Structure formats: C-alpha cells, structure tokens
Amino acid sequence: MSFSAKIRHIAKQKTVSTNIRMTEETTHIDVGQNKILNLDADDQGNFIAFTGNKTVVSNDHDLKIEIDYSFPVIRRLNKDKFFIADSRTEKGNNGYIFNFSGQLLKTFLAGDGIQDIIVHREKIIITYFDEGVYGSDGPNGDGLAVFDFEGQQLFGVNSSAGNTVIADCYCICKHGTNRVLFYAYTDLKVFILNLDTFEIESFETPNDFSGTSAISSTADKIIFHSSYQDKKSFFSWDRNKKEVIKFGDYSPGLKGIKNGKFLIYGDSGYTIINPTE
C-alpha cells in the first residue's frame, strides 16, 4: 500500500481557559447481576456491550457466546454482524466475527496489545499500545492496522511507512465520512488517516495536551481530554486560529466518538458527554 506523510508545521499556539457548558446523557442497561466488561455506543442511542457471563447485549439483541476472553473489546460491524477481540494474545487468533444468531463466522489474528478498535467505512481499525508494538510478531507491530470484514489486513502504519511511526497509539476517533484521527507516541502528533486511499497527514501538535488519552472532532476543532499533567480537563484546538482553549472537568477514562463527543461506561450503563454544548 502507498503511504504519504504530510507534515504541517504549526506556529506557537495561544492558550486560554474558559467556561463552556457541558451536557451528559446517561443510558442504563439491564444486565441483571452481571457487569459490563466492554461497550461501544454512538450519540444516536445505538450500543453494543459484552458482560461477565459472556452475553452480548445491544438495542435489539441479547445472546450468549461460548468463547473465553481475558480482556474483551466488542464492536458492531453492521446490522447483521459484530466483532469481538481479546486485547491480549500469544500469537493465536484473537479476533472473532459473529452474526447476531451467535454463529461464529470468522476468526483471525487481530494482534496483541490492543488499545482500541473502531469500525468506520466498512473497515475495522485497531490500535495498539507499546507492549503490542514491540512484542510478538503480528499486526500489532504496525501500531495501527486496518482490516476488512473478512479479517484480512489492508493496511498498517509502521510497515507501510518503512520505519516506526507509532510506538504507542494513545487514542483514535472517527473523523468525517471516510477518515480517522489518532494521536500517537513517540512524535505526539495528530494524524489523519484516509480509509479510502490510506494516505496519512500529520500535524505538529501543541504541548498543552501532550499525552492526551481521548480525541474527538467537530467541523472546525479537535477536542482532547486529559494530558500528562492534567488528567481531567478538556482542550479545544482550533488549528486555523492557532489557539488552544482549556475548559471543563471530567474524570479519566473517556473515549472519543464522533461530533466532538465522548463516551464512558460503567457496570450497567454508559454516558455520552458533549463538552462544548
């Protein structure tokens, strides 16, 4: 696959603090005496979760699957299928595609040290933390790998770049109709990956939110949550104005979704946070 890294140098940023109204919407899920081990949701009320008794729960399904997981990550692929992976593996297949009847359709090596998974543009995008990148052979060595719904790897950042670009992918989110945003160590830059062409752009990034753990985007801004030095604040980066606004306060553990919003889940439900509304 072709790879293109475009570096844009950003001038020194202006940082200000402000008070911005924040909204939250919490959804409770009836999982009985069980606990949610992993969950994904969007801002339209669609969710899928995996519980401690191996039950998959979504808006319109409730089924058990008989595969053992240590650290499960679950994502809906479409109305017919879902994907579940164990974030740790010792070279064995750890990615599984099921239909909502509970039938196992496909298994494949999704890689060790999975940090996050998103599904966008009919592709499975998997990111990895450093233990995976520098661990056993597999797609994890790419830092970020893209698969189709058959489990075939279509693209990997590090192998396509010819050298190590990602040592640890800290966070990722959907960005528009066909792209993803991600933030990665060691460069601590924001990257945009086009899922149609696999072209990458990278941007020199202000130090205000170095080490951020969650990212989301609006039409004109990129929103981050937390940094190495500040685990609770949000940061809004306007690249055109070269301005960073620090605002808000929320506990750690957020995951960025679309439209500048964030997700956090607990034992029996989840909350969508809109930090700029």
Image (cartoon, helix red, strand yellow):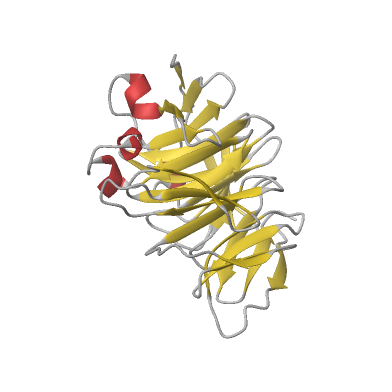
Determine whether 178 is above or below 231 in the image.
Answer: above
Which quarter of the picture shows residue 20?
bottom right
In which quadrant is the N terminus drawn?
A: top left
Left/right placement of residue 190 relative to residue 185 reads: right
Q: Nearer the viewer, residue 183 or 143?
A: 143
Q: Position of residue 194 (x, y in %)?
A: 57, 25
The residue at the point 51 percent across, 22 percent down is 198
Which quarter of the picture shows residue 167?
top left
The residue at the point 63 percent across, 48 percent down is 81
Q: Nearer the viewer, residue 13 or 198?
A: 198
Residue 29 visible in this rendered orientation of the protein: yes
Left/right placement of residue 139 relative to residue 76 reads: left
Left/right placement of residue 268 relative to residue 203 reads: right
Q: Report the residue that reaches farthest toward the bottom.
A: 33
Q: Position of residue 53 (x, y in %)?
A: 50, 75
Count of labels in the image: 0
In which quadrant is the C terminus drawn?
A: bottom right
Which quarter of the picture shows residue 218?
top right
The residue at the point 46 percent across, 42 percent down is 126
Q: Position of residue 95 (x, y in %)?
A: 44, 48
The residue at the point 53 percent across, 33 percent down is 148
Residue 242 visible in this rendered orientation of the protein: no
